[in-house]
Image: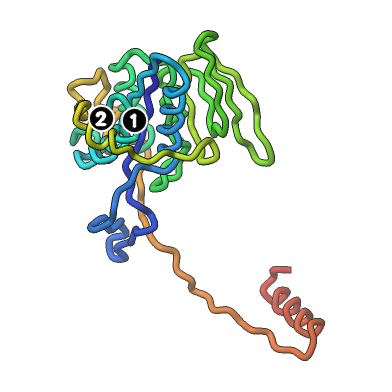
Amino acid sequence: MKIIVCVKQVPDTNEVRINHETGTLIRAGVPSIINPDDKNAIEEALRIKDQHEDVHVTILTMGPPQAKEALNEALAMGADEAILLTDRAFAGSDTWATATILAAAVEKIGDYDIIMCGRQAIDGDTAQVGPEMAEFLDLPQITYVEKLEVLPKEGKVLANRAVEGGHYVIESKMPVVLTTIKELNEPRYMSTWGIFQNVRKNPVKVMTSDDLVIDRSQIGLKGSPTNVYKTFVPTNKFEGEIIEGSSAQEKAGQLITKMREKHVL
């Protein structure tokens, strides 16, 4: 069985600051991490590998050369192979263009049964790339997976898809695209063997746009139908008001009066 896990290296949002003059993220000195939902995807792929024979896990990411660090972490967790898609032609890609590039890379790899992605990235929160990939590859998809059972002999998967207040149980044939959420599992740590042996044994492979069969008009900034117009930190322009009164009833009456004056009630 062949599993491809798509991951993204993102800035640790607990450390992110905004340049108030330019409205852009200040990335200098900000640590980068594997997107949390993507780590759940890696972990689930590795659990499938632990449970079944002849499972090969490939980690795929698109990003600058520094994204190799994220791939090495995935290898240290136990993945078999890692591929970095990096090219100036990819710069500025929105979700559509990113999914186009990743889908082309998946087609280049060619042999796969399951494609896994995290539900969404913490730097964009769109949850669009996984489903878009499924559409481009003409594959069935199950999103928001909180529980998964893989049945290799039957060639299918059985998943619990989380919805508000419950879940759907969905069966799908393979190949299939799955997007994972944190409730699915608890990601493992890197192992000593992984750090000192697997990373050295399996160096990260690099692909550029020249390695892919792709329409260049559909990638990069120019090929992206959406763009970020402005990034800013919301500011509180209003101050609170303390309502005085000798009793709760009196305070409530004053509150209702003020709300009516502002046409809230």
Most distant residue in the right direction: 249
Dot 1 or dot 2, earlier in sequence: 1
Q: Which residue is mark 1?
A: 78
As helix, strand or loop, the secondary structure at mark 1 comes to loop
| Label 1 environment density (alpha carbons within 10 Å; few <14, some 14–19, many ≥20) | many
**130 above or below 251?**
above
- Identify which residue, 240 or 229, lies in the foreground: 240
Q: In the image, residue 4 lies at what x, y percent?
A: 37, 24
Q: How is the image coloured?
A: rainbow
Q: Is 209 on the left-hand or right-hand side of 79?
A: left
What residue is shown at x 30% (from left), y 24% (from top)?
80
Q: Are marks 1 and 2 in contact (CB under 8 Å)?
A: yes
Q: Which mark is residue 55?
A: none
Q: In the image, residue 243 lies at what x, y percent?
A: 68, 84
**The image quarter in which residue 225 lies:** top left
Q: In the image, residue 59 lies at what x, y percent?
A: 32, 28
What residue is shown at x 35% (from left), y 13% (from top)?
111
Q: Which mark is residue 198?
A: 2
Q: CA distance from mark 1 to mark 2?
A: 7 Å
**The image quarter in which residue 247 lies:** bottom right
| Label 2 environment density (alpha carbons within 10 Å; few <14, some 14–19, many ≥20) | many
What residue is shown at x 39% (from left), y 17% (from top)?
55
Q: Is 252 on the left-hand or right-hand side of 183?
A: right
**202 above or below 21?**
above
